[in-house]
Amino acid sequence: MTDDLDNLLSDIQQQCDDAAHDMFGEEISRWQDPAHARIMENPDSAGEMQGSCGDLIKIFLKIENGTISEASFYTTGCGPSIVSADMACELCTGKTIDQASEIDGEHILQRLGGLPEDKTHCAHLASSALQEALGNWLGRK
């Protein structure tokens, strides 16, 4: 009986893993364990965007000598919002303000290997939150 239950649970887990892989592609580990997911203490700047879907992404930045030394995010959104925000943070870390200002939703989608068509807006939402954070920092300088 336990072998049957173990096999059933194993099959269900595999189906979930396959569905997540279909949704998040090769970046599934980013969804399961995002490296940059946290509310940063005392950021130098932050930007927040809310999509028409209701997802909210907030990006926090530490900036030293015009270079982003650290980035993190908070989201109330779905898995694609998580992976998009995490990728936005990865892409901007170590970049100058000018370099980071060139990061857009298409860059995020490309680095993620794409998202389902109905979720591509999440990458654009993450890039908009990043651009808002950069704009807020520049506005104070």
Image (spheres, rainbow, N blue to C red):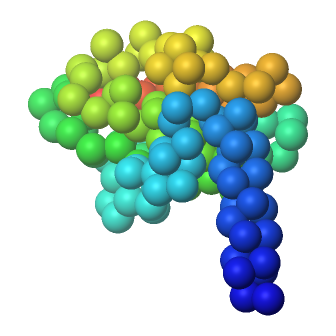
Q: Residue 81, image x and y in percent? A: 66, 41
Res. 119 image quadrant = top right
For the residue pair 70 and 35, the one nearer the viewer reads as 35
101 to the left or right of 115: left
Whether residue 10 is situated above or below residue 141 in the rendered picture = below
For the residue pair 29 and 37, the one nearer the viewer reads as 29
Residue drawn at x 81%, y 20% is: 117
Res. 25 image quadrant = top right
79 to the left or right of 53: left
Whether residue 43 is situated above or below residue 1 in the rendered picture = above
For the residue pair 137 and 47, the one nearer the viewer reads as 47
Residue drawn at x 79%, y 70% is: 8
Residue drawn at x 24%, y 20% is: 96
The answer to whether residue 26 is visible is yes
64 to the left or right of 2: left
Residue drawn at x 46%, y 33% is: 87
Q: Quadrant of the N terminus?
A: bottom right
Q: Residue 28, image x and y in percent? A: 55, 42
Whether residue 112 is situated above or below residue 85 in the rendered picture = above
The answer to whether residue 77 is visible is no
